[in-house]
Image (cartoon, rainbow, N blue to C red):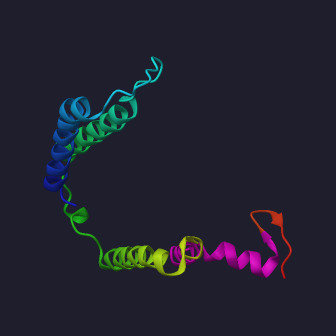
Amino acid sequence: MDMKRDRLIGAGLFLFGLFTYFWIIPHFIDKPSFYMPELPSDLYPKFIVGTIILLGAILFLQGIFSPMRKDQEKMPMENKKRAAIIISVLIAFLFAIDIIGFYIAVAGFLVGMITYLGGKAYLGNFLKRGYFYGFKLPVF
């Protein structure tokens, strides 16, 4: 991603965070009927929005002060293919939750992603030698 786009995204996140912090949270976060002085109801939203403001400012300032290098402007083709495969598997996973159920879909998704992203060496060691991270496990 080039630095100009980083600056725009950072400035957008920063301004959206300020808008949310100073207008949306005070107007739309209600005070609860029971009042707990130790933990106000807007603590978590203010914390999350403050984090977004901080990260947006960091992204904006990084886009301004870091030198632009030509070799990092474009994503390599193999990374684009890998990202497209991961996104398509995520979309298929969302549809599979309704079709085959949550637990089966999650198990299949995790095994598939671990295998695709390079974790199959650990599974191979377990199946060949009968241990996994130093634990001796029975192999059936």
Can you give x and y, in whole percent of width and height, for residue 4 in the image? 13, 53
Magenta stretch holds residue 102: no
Region of the chain picked out in magenta, as a range: 107-131
Image height check: is 70 above or below 128? above
- The answer to which quarter of the image holds residue 110 is bottom right
Q: Residue extending furthest top?
A: 37
Image height check: is 81 above or below 133? below
Magenta segment, prevailing SS (helix, strand or loop):
helix
Can you give x and y, in whole percent of width and height, for residue 125 in the image? 73, 76
Magenta stretch holds residue 125: yes
Can you give x and y, in whole percent of width and height, for residue 29 in the image? 30, 33
> Left or right: where does residue 107 sit relative to residue 77?
right
Please state, as top left, top right, bottom left or bottom right, where the N terminus lies in the image: bottom left
- The answer to which quarter of the image holds residue 88 is bottom left
- The answer to which quarter of the image holds residue 130 is bottom right
Image height check: is 10 above or below 27? below
Q: Does residue 33 show up?
A: yes
Residue found 16% across the figure and 39% down from its top: 15
Residue found 76% across the figure and 80% down from its top: 127
Q: Residue extending furthest front?
A: 33
Can you give x and y, in whole percent of width and height, for residue 65 in the image? 19, 41
> Left or right: where does residue 45 sit relative to residue 12?
right
Residue found 70% across the figure and 79% down from its top: 124
